[in-house]
Image (tube, grey):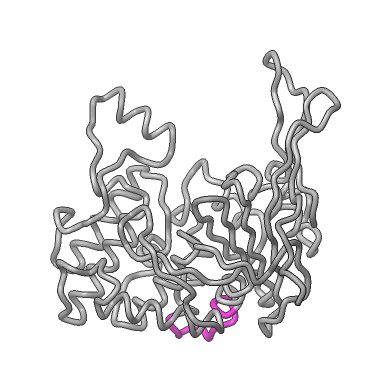
Amino acid sequence: MPSPPSPVPIAEYTRSGMVEGVHVGHVAIVDGAGAVVRSWGDPGQVIYPRSANKPVQAAAMVGSGLDLPPRLLALAASSHSGEPSHLSAVRDILAHAGLDETWLQTPPDWPLDPVERDAWLVAGQARTSVAMNCSGKHAAMLATCVAQGWSLHSYRDPAHPLQVAIAARLASLAGEPIAHTGVDGCGAPVLAISLAGLARSASRLVLAEAGSPEGQVAAAMRDYPDVVGGTRRDVTDFMRAVPGLMAKDGAAGVYVAALPDGTAIAVKVEDGSDAARRVVLAEVLIGLGADPGGLAGLREERVVGGGEAVGRLHSLVG
């Protein structure tokens, strides 16, 4: 019986005319019907999508009674940068449910954005739960529990009704069972699916009817890309550059994105490189017809030596 495809080179970086390193991984592209139409490596590779699952988690929450205006719903699907507007929006979600940030079970952290983090450090501010990049999702989870009358204390437990509903929604949208349940960096469950399943779930979000939970989340993310990421985040830049694109980054080298026609891309870089996942997604989008000019700043990264550009990181697929 043939073995499944191994990871393949999907990005490389050069220095002074020599290839210095290669990133290997997997890429899957599905069409609007959810079928894999092109891939590199193994589209069936089971991964933890990490925060790339957040759009589906948010849809499950809306399906369970979460009722937020679009800007705050976008935050529920975000890994926000910790800018003041983001932290204010987290508090708004909590206040909407009659709660405050003391209810959050996100581990205390500094803002994800390095500029914001440095400002906090200079000011002597300690890590807080609200600054952690998943606090929007957690605030929305708490608000959903309030709407349903579910326990607020155990909302991260995989057996909690909220997490059961999220797992069921993800399995349905991915078109496959959950392969494994782990603990994400924020303490909430992280659900493993295949790379193709991740792409399929994003495809089904962008194709969903406008008033459905999935349609509401997709619209909110596309209308508020600055909330999904932040001022200096490539996930925000992608959605601004490609009309109608819904995109979500995930830790450890994961990206998922879906075009308005339901074509969706999922990327997993085996070594977890954020830069490699970015250049790969940009090049695949260009291969699918996106404007190269709009993605010029995303499709490669300079390799610097002595303060000057001496090479570049670029995609090998697309």
- Residue farthest to the right, as pictured: 17
Decide which of 291, 124 is in the foreground and name it.
124
Find residue 128 and report its horizontal and vertical position in percent: 23, 42
Asked where in the image residue 217 lies, by quadrant, the reply is bottom left
Range of residues picked out in magenta: 204-213
Quarter of the image where the C terminus is located: bottom right
Counting every numbered tag in the picture gives 0
User: Position of 216 compared to 13: left or right?
Assistant: left
Find residue 309 and report its horizontal and vertical position in percent: 74, 23
- Residue farthest to the front, as pictured: 1
- Residue farthest to the top, as pictured: 306
Find residue 310 and report its horizontal and vertical position in percent: 77, 23
Asked where in the image residue 144 lies, by quadrant, the reply is bottom left
Q: Is residue 43 above or below residue 113?
A: below
The residue at 37%/53% (across/down) is 185
Decide which of 231, 61 is in the foreground and name it.
61
Find residue 125 and report its horizontal and vertical position in percent: 23, 31
Asked where in the image residue 54 lies, by quadrant, the reply is bottom left
